[in-house]
């Protein structure tokens, strides 16, 4: 039958802790038991050796030549144990010369062994005829010109009873220790996981309306603190995504309202008056113009949303920047010829350096910048494109687009990158579009690790400078 698994982490940690501790305690108890048994056995051997030496001094032959042992000699308080000894004395031929009454007529390990007790005290455990076991020490001793083999032993029953009591004590103490350890482990796990519990409660209270709130991290250096930091970073990304969605929705609603209202007004006016075909044609042309503008606004908003959403490196490729600029110039060739603008390229060799970015988005960014420059360039003017590099830890390429248009009014060099910003300055307002082109360009170039700005020192025309890291 499979036992139910604890549902919460605290109980599982306590169970694992108690299981490991229980296994260690059992191993420890077994090692202690074996060690203690070995120590007592060595002590028993030492005592028996001393007892053999003592017994050798107590043996004597009586008048009939019979070997006896003086049992009434007690030199120390512990000597009363000597009366409990198991002792047998044999001559070298194996004849029994003396056998203690404690053996009750049983032999202490049978016939003589070859070389038994010749040079030292031989020890061993033997089984007696009554089934009990004894620890026996043998030694050769000479008495009154006769050589004899002395065997002295003690029953192992008391020792094993004592060791059994010790083992039972260990087995009883182990569950008690495990119960105390389980209680302590539960408290420790509860205290250790308290920050996680608090973070969970805090996270449950965070919704779309309060995404600015963050989890409280007590110790940012431990594992729970790392989890908290990861969750806070996730909340940062969610908040940014919600902000982008709300901003996109607001921008779309704001920019689509005006052209839709214009379309409706033109249509209502055309239908409300009895106009001729020429007037209807003019109304349709106005509707078509507003539709084109509306389509451009929608495409710019979608491109802006795509640029904000992209963050994967899988769309990035390595390519030559001058080739991309030339490709954009070929797309704008009709406008260049129509306005009779001369395009001059300086240091194109430097522009052959390679960059790593999303090529399609960067192409759109350059297209917006160049289209702006051409849109504000007067006829038969010059558009200059120059390339240069900066030295440093990360080498960068600078691409400058300089036109001879009306320029950017003071105080608007940063505002031109804001969404839907259109200047009211003379000579600029008439050519302003939806105000999204430079916003898209800035977002794309920032995502590529670069920067875009307008030279504020220019008094005639505008000079847009794009910086991109070079891929080596």
Image (cartoon, rainbow, N blue to C red):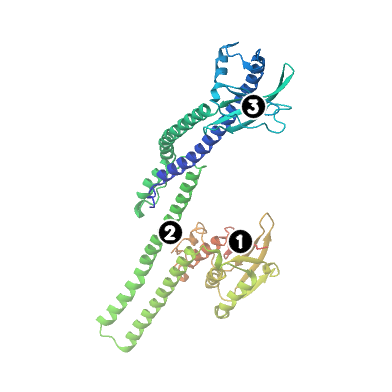
> Where, by quadrant of the figure, is residue 318 drawn?
bottom right
In the picture as drawn, the residue positioned furthest to the front comes out as 64
Q: Is residue 106 visible?
A: yes
Up/down of 257 relative to 148, above or below: below
- Front residue of 444 and 64: 64
Q: Judging from the image, what secondary structure is the residue with disc 2 in?
A: helix
> Where, by quadrant of the figure, is residue 325 drawn?
bottom right
Pointer 3 residue: 137
Pointer 2 residue: 241
Instruction: Please tell me whether mark 3 or mark 2 is closer to you in this view.
Output: 3
Which disc is residue 154 wearing? none
Pointer 1 residue: 467
Up/down of 221 relative to 61, above or below: below
Q: Could you tell me how far apart the alpha carbons at marks 1 and 2 are, in whole angstroms?
A: 27 Å
Up/down of 260 relative to 226, above or below: below
- Front residue of 260 and 186: 186
Q: Residues within 10 Å of mark 1 (few under 14, many from 20)?
A: many
């Amino acid at each position: 039958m499979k036992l139910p698994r604890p549902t919460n982490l605290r109980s599982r940690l306590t169970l694992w802790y108690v299981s490991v501790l229980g296994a260690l305690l059992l191993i420890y108890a077994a090692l202690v038991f074996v060690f203690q048994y070995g120590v007592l056995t060595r002590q028993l051997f030492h005592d028996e050796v001393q007892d053999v030496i003592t017994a050798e001094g107590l043996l004597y032959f009586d008048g009939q030549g019979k070997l006896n042992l003086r049992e009434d000699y007690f030199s120390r308080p512990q000597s009363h144990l000597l009366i409990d000894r198991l002792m047998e004395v044999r001559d070298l031929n194996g004849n029994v010369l003396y056998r203690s009454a404690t053996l009750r007529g049983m032999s202490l390990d049978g016939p003589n062994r070859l070389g038994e007790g010749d040079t030292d005290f031989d020890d061993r455990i033997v089984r007696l005829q009554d089934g009990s076991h004894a620890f026996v020490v043998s030694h050769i001793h000479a008495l009154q010109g006769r050589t004899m083999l002395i065997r002295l032993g003690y029953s192992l029953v008391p020792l094993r009873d004592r060791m059994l009591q010790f083992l039972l004590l260990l087995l009883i103490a182990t569950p008690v220790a495990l119960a105390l350890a389980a209680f302590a482990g539960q408290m420790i796990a509860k205290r250790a996981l308290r920050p996680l519990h608090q973070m969970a409660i805090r996270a449950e209270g965070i919704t779309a309306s309060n995404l600015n709130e963050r989890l409280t991290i007590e110790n940012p250096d431990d594992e729970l603190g790392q989890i908290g930091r990861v969750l806070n970073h996730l909340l940062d990304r969610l908040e940014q995504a919600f902000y982008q969605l709300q901003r996109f929705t607001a921008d779309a609603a704001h920019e689509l309202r005006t052209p839709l209202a214009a379309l409706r007004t033109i249509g209502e006016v055309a239908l409300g008056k009895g106009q001729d075909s020429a007037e209807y044609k003019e109304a349709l042309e106005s509707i078509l113009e507003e539709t084109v503008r509306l389509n451009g606004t929608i495409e710019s908003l979608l491109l802006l949303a795509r640029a904000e959403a992209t963050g994967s490196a899988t769309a990035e490729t390595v390519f030559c920047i001058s080739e991309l600029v030339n490709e954009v110039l070929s797309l704008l060739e009709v406008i260049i010829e129509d306005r009779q603008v001369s395009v001059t390229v300086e240091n194109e060799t430097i522009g052959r350096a390679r960059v790593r970015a999303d090529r399609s988005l960067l192409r759109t960014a350059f297209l917006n910048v160049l289209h702006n420059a051409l849109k504000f360039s007067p006829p038969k003017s010059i558009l200059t494109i120059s390339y240069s590099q900066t030295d440093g830890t990360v080498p960068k390429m600078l691409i400058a687009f300089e036109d001879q248009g009306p320029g950017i009014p003071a105080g608007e060099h940063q505002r031109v990158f804001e969404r839907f910003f259109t200047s009211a300055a003379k000579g600029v307002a008439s050519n302003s579009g939806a105000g999204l082109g430079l916003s898209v360009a800035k977002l794309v170039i920032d995502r590529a690790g670069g920067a875009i700005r307008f030279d504020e020192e220019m008094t005639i025309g505008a000079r847009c400078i794009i910086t991109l890291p070079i891929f080596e």
